Image: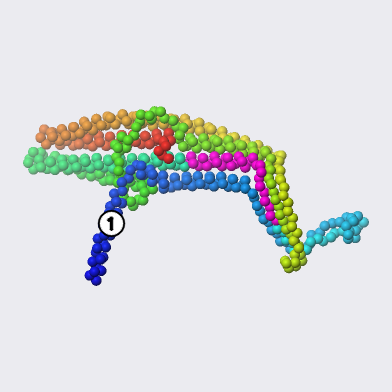
Amino acid sequence: MTLTALAMVLFAGFLFPANTAKAQAIDNLELTLEVALKSAMEGNPDVLVSALEVQRAQSQLKAVKGNFLPQVSVDGQYARNLKRPVFFLPADSNFPGAGGGGTGPDEGTVIEAGFDNSYQLAAQATLPLYNRQLITSAKAARTAINISERGQDISKNEIATQVRKAYYDALLAKESLEVLGRSLENAQQNFTNTQNQFAQQLVPQYDVIRAEVQVENLRPDLLQGENDYEAAISNLKLLANIPDELPVVLAQSLQQLMESTGTELLAQYTVENNPNLLQLGAQAVYQQEQIQVQQASYFPTIAAFANYGTQSQSNNFRFSDYFWVNTSSVGLQLNIPVFQGLTRMRSVEQARIDLKQTEIQREYLVRSLNVQARNALNRIQRTRAAMEAQRRNIAQAQKGFEIAQISYRSGYGTLIEANDAELALTQARLGYLQVVYEYLNALADFEQLTGNKSNN
């Protein structure tokens, strides 16, 4: 028992540190924007559904191509003749037995044919040699794959933008919470200093009460900030396909992401790579091919065929005694469409209307994308300029805060001035974060509109 207990202790000593290290690794999962985007592209439901749409279009192309292969069918039939089939012979027929079965001088003879049981088995194979409609349909099916792929790009583009914005939301909540935390620390330090000064009879009790109120006023804001951060993280996990129970730590900051972007070449943008626009372009090609498909119905078709059949009849079920008759044939079949009630003409007309609608939608989308891209670019440039003002504002607020603190501790300033300075510094820091956040969001919108390739 002693050796067994010792072995268990040693085993636990080796096992639990490994599990602990693994748990710590999971608890400290560092999530960058790139990792979040990659995870979303691999597991987001919208992206997965769009990938299945591509597979569906590919399967439809294979189905169309299957029409070029031989079509083989086998038919079998058994019939029990309750009344045997008959055929009629005229009275003047030279066929043996004719001329006596009728009731009038001009009537012939009715003769029963066949047996009680009838069996037929037939096999047929056809192979299209020329079918213009099949050829154009296969071409249209390939374009349909392109449309589905562009739809997948649309999903990826939208999800990438949503993940970026969710990551920015989480960073804003996190860094705003940090600013509020520093503000609370300053208020608590100020409260402690005021208590010490009051103990030395350097400040009135009113200052102590006001300093304490300042601390308590910040606690609800801090709690709200924590709730906002948790909600933002949950939304980010949902979009990025990260298990909700898996804790994450944001490995980047708004400042780092802002510094990693460049705006020098943004003015030379084009919306031609927008996936929505590319999909409409593919749809226009598809509409043109649909016109060709309908026009191809005017052309004749040629197919090769081969038939083989066997049949037998008998009054009994002794199959071994049956006499089977085999027939076979091969040949070519020509089908020339002549008139189908103007349906083909109307189908072509409808396909042309569909093409016109797509062209109108594409033209409007180009104009809309250009307007939105210009607006997003203006937001980028405006927030970029606002950042410089906010940086100067933070520097001035920091300087004013330090002066107010020194003045109050020296007895030359008031607590109201110190609190106002601290509030101004907090607002300046939050304002700067908000401007950087707005800049990154405007950039995300701009990249979505112009079809940035990093989204794919």
Foreground: 206 or 51? 51
Q: Residue at x 43, y 40 (%)?
A: 456
Q: Quadrant of the N terminus?
A: bottom left
Q: Residue at x 46, y 40 (%)?
A: 153
Which is the main secondary structure of the residues drawn in magenta? Answer: helix
**Magenta stretch bounds:** 122-151
Q: Secondary structure at mark 1?
A: helix
Q: Is residue 235 visible?
A: no
Q: Amino acid at mark 1?
A: Ala
Q: Does 136 lie within the magenta span?
A: yes
Give above or below for 42 relative to 396: below
Q: Whole-percent x and y of residue 163?
A: 38, 42
The residue wearing badge 1 is: 18
Foreground: 173 or 89? 89
Q: In the rendered view, does 281 fall on the left or right side of 219?
A: right
Q: Whole-percent x and y of residue 381?
A: 34, 29
* The image quarter in which residue 451 lies: top left
Q: Whole-percent x and y of residue 148?
A: 50, 42
